[in-house]
Amino acid sequence: MITSKTARNLLNFILFQVGWLACVLYPGLATVGLILVFLGLHLALVSQRRFSELQFIGFGVVLGGLMDTLWFRTGVLALDSGAEVLAAPPWLIAIWAIFMTTLCHSLGWIGQRQWLPWVLAPIAGPFAYWSASQLGVVALPNLTISLVAMAVGWFVLFPLLLFIRKALYTELET
């Protein structure tokens, strides 16, 4: 494990950014495998509470996957290929897994200000999906409706995830 908090946060941030970009540019099972490797590196080098953090990651993956599935099923989000989606694809679930690692590390600072998650999440969350749409992996069928729905979803889910971390996984507080 890396002892420097700054170095751990930097590695966590890099793993997330590279993982997100890999999933968006190369959506497929090979990239899901890469994310599993990144998660292993994260747990080995960054995480100080591996079991608790793995539980928290799993919790967030389920909630995030359900939100993305809802968006696919309601037409807020679509695959750029036009294929019908019954559930969030594996590469998107992988993004949720690698994203969840940031909530205890490189993005942990967001939860230190009570108002910040409520302001930042409705902007940053939809921006990530819009960015993915610009790279051609997903589509936002009706841009305005999609972005508003995502802003509402992130307005609810992101603070909820931080609350869950604080209430159920106090040992993960930054």
Image (cartoon, grey):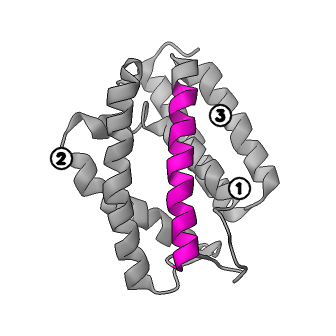
Q: Which residue is drawn at 55% across and 40% down?
A: 14
Q: Which mark is residue 90?
A: 1
For disc 3, the neighbor class at 10 Å (few under 14, some 14 to 19, many from 20) is many
> Element type at marker 1?
helix
Secondary structure at badge 3 equals helix
Any mark on residue 115, and which?
2
Q: Which residue is drawn at 43% across and 20% down?
A: 5
Q: Is residue 151 visible?
A: yes
Residue 134 visible at all: no
Which quarter of the picture shows residue 65? bottom right
The quadrant in which residue 2 appears is top right
Which SS type dominates the magenta stretch?
A: helix
Q: Marks 3/1: CA distance?
A: 15 Å
Magenta-span inclusion, residue 67: yes
Real-space CA distance between mark 3 and mark 2, rounded to the nearest whole angstrom: 29 Å
Seen at 73% across and 80% down, the residue is 83
Say whether residue 29 is left or right of residue 145: right
- Would you say residue 61 sits in the magenta stretch? yes
Q: Is residue 94 left or right of residue 59?
A: right
Query: Is residue 71 placed above or below 168 in the rendered structure?
Result: below
Q: Which mark is residue 39?
A: 3
Instruction: Specify the segment rendered in magenta.
Output: 53-75
- Mark 2 or mark 3, which is nearer the start of the sequence? 3
